[in-house]
């Protein structure tokens, strides 16, 4: 399939979510690889899904950060909305944990800290992700992390009423904060709770709260205290417990404060064979970041 005489798409999608399907493709005009996301309607045309898809594009256009995908183009093809984005090589944290098992503490902290950097930029623009989870975090071969899928993100509190149907809870149960479940509202501290669930999963190799139904998981998120993480430094275990506090006011104040608390654990990162480039391969991104890190 060719879109607009420009984007040549692969035959099979790279992945599909609740709102769209993503295809790899080639931009013939600029001769580069791209990812093309189509909006799909599982049950027929849906104006709310269209508004969310458009809003996601606008959010990506505003969020200029190396840890978020770049939006190249947006339009309509065959009466379907599409986004053209940077093609990102890597593995999702979900697949990483599935194949590797529990991650070493330095890597779990480094992945979470990079996500914090993206959230700090997003929250500064009043953008709340609302669906942070292992499948939306991608580890690239140079060790960098990309935060993906802003399809449920909101730009302001008013979006809750505009984009949430009566009786509908938006998000993924295993990573939803109690306030999202109970009141249908989310703020930056809801993203921190979700990241706490992800961090717990990276260190244990399994989802924090599971159950036979979504409602069973919702009940645990709201009422059940999370189990401690065995075999990790006491301060990191305390940090995870703080992130998973049921009341938002008891969690760390913001993503930057969380980043600062994660930094001491993100040191001496071991190799992850099969997931990262060999150390002999230069990383321009790390070279650049290392110099920026020396600026005070």
Image (tube, rainbow, N blue to C red):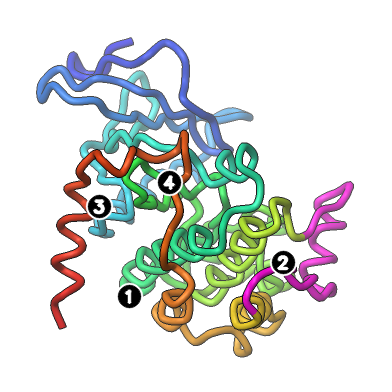
Label 2 SS? helix
**Which residue position is annotated with label 4?**
139
The answer to the question of whether label 2 and label 3 lie on touching residues, with beta carbons closer than 8 A, is no
Q: Is 20 situated above or below 266?
A: above
3D distance between C-alphas at marks 4 and 3: 22 Å
3D distance between C-alphas at marks 1 and 2: 24 Å
First in residue order: circle 4 vs circle 1: 1
Q: Residue 226 location, x and y as percent?
A: 78, 71
**Which residue position is annotated with label 2?**
181
The answer to whether one can see residue 201 in this image is: yes
3D distance between C-alphas at marks 2 and 3: 29 Å
**Which residue position is annotated with label 3?**
61
First in residue order: circle 2 vs circle 4: 4
Point out the frontmost of discs 1 and 2. 1
In the rendered structure, the answer to whether residue 203 lies left or right of residue 189 reads right
Chain part drawn in magenta: 209-233
In depth, the one of 17 and 43 nearer the eye is: 17
Splitting the image into 4 quarters, where does residue 16 fall? Answer: top right
At x 53% / y 60%, what residue is drawn? 108
3D distance between C-alphas at marks 1 and 3: 15 Å
Label 3 SS? helix
3D distance between C-alphas at marks 2 and 4: 29 Å
């Amino acid at each position: 399939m060719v879109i607009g005489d420009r984007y040549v798409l692969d035959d099979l999608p790279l992945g599909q979510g609740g709102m769209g399907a993503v295809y790899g493709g080639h931009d013939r005009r600029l001769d580069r690889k791209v990812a093309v996301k189509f909006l799909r309607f599982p049950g027929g045309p849906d104006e709310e899904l269209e508004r969310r898809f458009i809003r996601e594009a606008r959010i990506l256009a505003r969020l200029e950060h190396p840890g978020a995908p770049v939006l190249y183009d947006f339009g309509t093809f065959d009466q379907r909305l599409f986004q053209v984005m940077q093609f990102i090589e890597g593995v999702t944290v979900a697949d990483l944990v599935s194949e590797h098992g529990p991650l070493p503490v330095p890597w779990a902290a480094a992945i979470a800290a990079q996500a914090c950097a993206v959230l700090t930029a997003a929250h500064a623009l009043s953008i709340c992700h609302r669906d942070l989870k292992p499948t939306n975090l991608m580890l690239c071969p140079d060790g960098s992390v990309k935060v993906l899928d802003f399809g449920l993100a909101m730009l302001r509190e008013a979006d809750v009423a505009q984009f949430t149907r009566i009786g509908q809870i938006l998000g993924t149960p295993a990573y939803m904060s109690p306030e999202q479940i109970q009141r249908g509202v989310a703020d930056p501290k809801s993203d921190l709770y979700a990241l706490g669930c992800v961090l717990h999963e990276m260190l244990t190799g399994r989802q924090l709260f599971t159950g036979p139904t979504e409602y069973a998981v919702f009940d645990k998120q709201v009422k059940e205290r999370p189990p401690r993480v065995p075999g990790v430094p006491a301060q990191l275990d305390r940090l995870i417990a703080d992130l998973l506090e049921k009341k938002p006011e008891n969690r760390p104040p913001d993503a930057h404060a969380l980043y600062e608390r994660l930094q001491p654990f993100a040191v001496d990162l071991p190799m992850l064979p099969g997931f990262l480039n060999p150390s002999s391969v230069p990383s321009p991104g790390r070279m650049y970041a290392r110099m920026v890190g020396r600026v005070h």
